Amino acid sequence: MSTAPTSPPSADRPRRRARRGEGERTREEILAAAEALLARSGSEDAVSIRAVADAVGVTPPSIYRHFPDKAHLIFEVCARRFEEMDRHVVSPILAADLDPVDAIVELGRAYVRFGLAHPEHYRLMFMVNADHSPELYAEGDVVDGGSLGRIVVLLQHAIDAGRIRPEAGDAVVLTYVLWAALHGIVSLAIGRPNLPGPSVDEQVDAMIDAVLHGIVVPPPAGSP
């Protein structure tokens, strides 16, 4: 039997330096695999580090080079979905030069549609215990870094344009009131999808009418 020295275990070898862009490409593949698993299963439980690694074709330790734990990976996937909503839903509505009240109505309906189209993403971002969220996705960061700040600006524009009663409250308060009402509809539909009652569309229309009826000033006569 040969007594030639064997090569040292691979764990003892220096790790090959990733080529420029290779690490970022692997990170994107990890996120895509986690997103696919979450969408296919409808549950974060199916998105294990092992399952993601197998889908990408890497070892589990490779995942930890990009994400410290499963929670950070999952929340990055969810955050990207909400960024997508901001780009493809919120931005076009805000850029459409609508009457500010009409824009608020459109955004409200779009928000509910998005939440119901991505129930597990929504649940993770807004319906789990705050202790479950990584520090990067704490409540303050989600609010300040998301679409909410742009909605505050829209509400302020509606106030400045005289379309909202000045005594109804400031733009931040009104944004949270509208958000809470919409969140209630989305969370109820996600948490109790088989609950008898009116359709989600009926609930949204009634809620928007009820909330806006109390704060909106009709447009001036003769306006389009």
Image (cartoon, grey):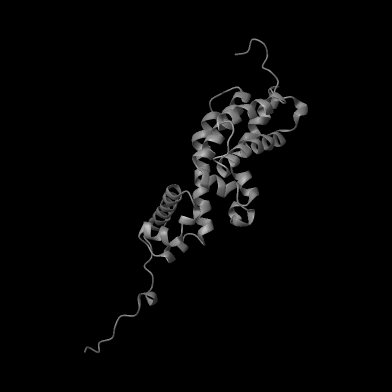
Front-most of residues 209 and 110: 209
Q: Residue furthest left?
A: 1
Please, which residue is most extreme toward the right here? 167
The percent coordinates of residue 43 (x first, y second) are 49, 51
- Residue 205 appearing in the image: yes
Report the label total: 0
- Quadrant where the image shows the N terminus: bottom left
**Vertically, is 5 above or below 158?**
below
Q: Which percent across, then down, holds residue 176? A: 68, 38
Point out residue 172 in the picture as x, y percentages from the top left corner.
70, 36
Instruction: Decide: is 176 above or below 32.
Output: above
Q: Position of residue 202 (x, y in %)?
A: 58, 28
Q: Is residue 177 left or right of residue 93?
A: right
Q: Which quarter of the picture shows residue 112?
A: top right
Q: Quadrant of residue 105?
A: top right
* Left or right position of 42 against 103: left
Name the residue at 75% across, 32% down. Answer: 169
In terms of depth relative to the viewer, which is nearer, 92 or 196? 196
Q: Nearer the viewer, residue 220 or 46?
A: 46
The answer to whether residue 65 is visible is no
Write the residue at 63% across / 53% down: 129
Furthest-top residue in this view? 222
Q: Quadrant of the C terminus?
A: top right
Q: Quadrant of residue 199?
A: top right
